[in-house]
Image (cartoon, rainbow, N blue to C red):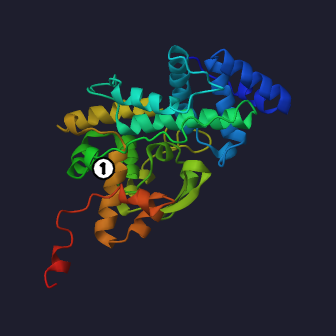
Amino acid sequence: MTLVRSSDTLALTNLTDQALRVRAVEAASTYDTDTLVQVTQAYMTTGSRKGARTSAKTLAAYSLAVRDFVPWAQTNGVQLLRPGRRDGGRYVAQLQSRPSHGRGKTGTLSAATIAQYVAGARALYRALRWAGATEAQPFEDAHVPPDPTPGIVKNPPYMREVDDVLPHCDARLAALLLLCAHAGLRVTEALNVKGSDIQGAQLTVHGKGGKVRRVPLGRRVRTALHRLPPLTPDGRLFEWQYHQVQYRMRLAFQAAGHSLAWRGFHAARKHSGTRLYRATKDFTRVGLFLGHSSVDTTRRYVALEENDVQNEVEDF
């Protein structure tokens, strides 16, 4: 996959309105995928609601979606600047029937993957409108069916696996797992922790979208972090890239006899959300702990016990 240089994206934002329109029209007319990715990224970082705080992960996901949609449009006779009113729905239907080629996966693309591709294609058209190239909105009425299976069912939290796996981790890997499973951090947040972020029993977390929150640290997490000397001059406690730490954690799960249970780091974050909810019965407090802006998001991180309200309804 061709990488988009940030300098190219920045150059687009510095064009005059007319020059930007010409560039976008030419790219759309010739199905120039690389330039259309640049236009989308330029819009996302300067014209969208989040602007420069748009995460690198979102930019990468939308870029991948544009690289999928543009060749499909060219192959299927879709004029990007003058799409038919049903073309958005055609693309969604094609995604729904497309075989999944993910590692170890069978069947068709998941609902989440389809939603991500469509979100990227919609962003492309917002970018083209921002550039003055078209007013078309082919995905305005395109319906993306939700996944009927809740995420907490498809990817439930780790529970006893955490304590089973910790003895098979070295000190740094164990601290990272505890930051996710007990302190509720996203793995990217955990990997960026510095010694100076720790103030007693509190951790300053630089989170998604540039948000900063203060997270209380339990005794086990504090002890694990205090054992780690900084690895860099600026005090970072971890130097791993995501793929490196994922590989190490997968090996630790295998060593603990839970190779089939490994579901990525998000299940560890759900572990913390589920345990905290069971202790507090308060989605709002759990959401603040996890750094969610919506309680609806928090609900997807908590595995409720079956018949959770049995005692409450006993005497109805």
Image coordinates for residue 129, horizontal then vertical, percent = 70, 36
Quadrant location of residue 12? Answer: top right
Q: Is residue 249 above or below residue 216?
A: above
Residue 82 in percent (x, y) is at 64, 26
Label 1 Cα neighbours within 10 Å, binned few <14 / some 14-19 / many ≥20: few
Residue found 55% across the figure and 41% down from its top: 140
Q: Residue at x 30, y 70 (%)?
A: 279
Q: Nearer the viewer, residue 72 or 307?
A: 72
> Does residue 111 sit above or below 35 in this rendering?
below
Residue that lies at the very extreme toward the bottom in this rendered image: 315
Residue 97, image x, y percentages: 34, 27
Look at the numbered disc 1 and give the secondary structure of its residue.
loop
Task: Provide the residue designation for mark 1.
Answer: 150
Q: Residue at x 25, y 37 (%)?
A: 253
| Front position in the image: 164 or 76 | 76
Q: Which residue is at a point 13% across and 80% down the rendered structure image?
A: 314
Residue in the foreground of this view, choosing between 12 and 94: 94
Q: Nearer the viewer, residue 140 or 213?
A: 140
